[in-house]
Image: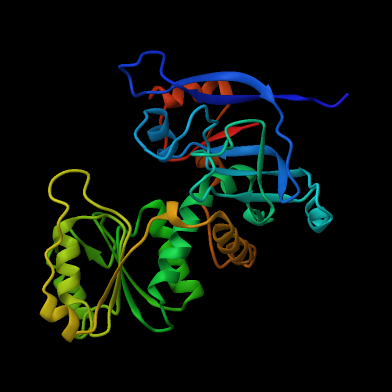
Amino acid sequence: MPDTTMKALQLTKPSSSSSQTPNLSLTTLPIPTPTPSRLLIKLHASQIQHSDLLNARGALPQLTLPRIPGRDYSGTVVSAPSPLHQHLLNQAVYGTSGPDLGFTEDGAHAEYVVVEADAVARKPERLSWAQCASGAGFWNTAWWVVEKAGIREGERVLVLGATGRVGSMVCELVENVRKGVVLRAGRREGLEVNTVKDPELEGVVKSTGGNGPDVVLDLVGDIKLTKRALEIIAVGGRMVCIAAPKDGSLELGVNLLSLFRKNVSILGFSSLRVPADDGARALEEMSKFFDEGKLTCWGDDEILKVSLEEAIDVYAGKRNAPHIVIEF
C-alpha cells in the first residue's frame, strides 16, 4: 500500500500573543494531491535559504501560517494528473519558489511538494541533487540580473560583489554566455578591482579608457560604492541593484543632470518578484549551459547535508555553512 503521509517541517502560529516568532516543528502530514495544472514531486534535496530562516523568525510579512517552509528543491515527478504533463512523470527536475512557495503555499522542507507544472526545470545531468537544490535560487537571481541589464557581446560589466554565490554565477553568465568583459570587484585579492584598496574605482576608469563600464551590477548595496559606480558609468550605461545596506542610510543621492545627459538607467531587482514559471525558464536554459560545461557549480562535497530532524538545529542557529541542504 503506498504511503499516504510524509514528514515535514511546519511553521505554526506563535503560542504567545506577545510573540511574532512562529513555532517550528517536525510533523507528519498527508501527502498533498496535485490538481490538474500541478505536479507531485518526491524530493531528494531542498536548500535552507536565508529567507527560510527569516520566515521562521516571522520577519517577512508575506508569510501565512501554518506553512511548510522551503523555496529551492530537486526531486522526481511522481504524479502528473493532466495528460498534458504526462511526459514529466519520473523526470528529474529542480526549481525555485517565486513569490508563493514557502510563503503562501507549502514549500519543499518535506518529503513531497506540489508545484505548478510550468515551475520546474530539467535537472542538469552533470550536477547532483544537492547541487541543484543549493543553487536554484542563486542561479535564478543571477540569470535575471544579467537579463534585466540587457548585456551585449563585448560590453564591459562591473560586478560589485563578484565573489558571492550570485556574483560568481553572474560573472560566468556574462563571460561565457553573453560574451561580455567582466570587471570583478570585491574585497579579495586577485580581482580586477579591490574595493578596499580602490574605493574610488579609479582602476575601472583607467581600464575602460576613461569611458567607464557599460553596465554596473550592484550585488552588495554599499551606498558609497554604488554612488561612485554610478558617477563613472559610461554614456548609455545601465545599473541593476539587488541589495541595500543592512544598516545606516538607504538613500542614494543621484545627480539628475548627469543621469539624463548620459542616458543612464537604474533598475532594481528582487527574485521574490519573479514568477515561478519565469524562474523555471531561466533554470531550463542554465541546465543546458551546465551540461555543455559553460557554467560551473561548487562541489557536492562543499554542501552540508542534513536530515529533516537535523534541520531543526540549523533553524535554531546551532549549525551553519555556506550551503545547507536537507536530504531525503
Count how many numbered circles sit on residues in the image. Answer: 0
Percent position of residue 317, x then y: 38, 25
Q: Is residue 15 above or below residue 76?
A: above
Could you say which quadrant of the image residue 260 lies in?
bottom left
In this rendering, position of residue 143 left or right of residue 95: left
85 and 215: which one is in front?
85
Residue at position x 66%, y 23% in the image: 29
- In the rendered image, the residue lying farthest to the right is 1
Percent position of residue 208, x then y: 23, 82
Applied colour scheme:
rainbow
Percent position of residue 216, x then y: 29, 70
If the image is split into quadrants, where does the N terminus sit?
top right
Residue at position x 45%, y 64% in the image: 144
37 and 251: which one is in front?
37
Could you say which quadrant of the image residue 118 lies in?
bottom right
Could you say which quadrant of the image residue 31 lies in?
top right
Percent position of residue 73, x then y: 59, 43
In this rendering, position of residue 3 left or right of residue 282: right
Q: Is residue 210 among what the camera can see?
A: no
In this rendering, position of residue 244 left or right of residue 47: left
If the image is split into quadrants, where does the C terminus sit?
top right
- In the rendered image, the residue lying farthest to the front is 17
In this rendering, position of residue 177 left or right of residue 211: right
Residue at position x 54%, y 58% in the image: 279
Residue at position x 44%, y 55% in the image: 273
Q: Is residue 188 among what the camera can see?
A: yes
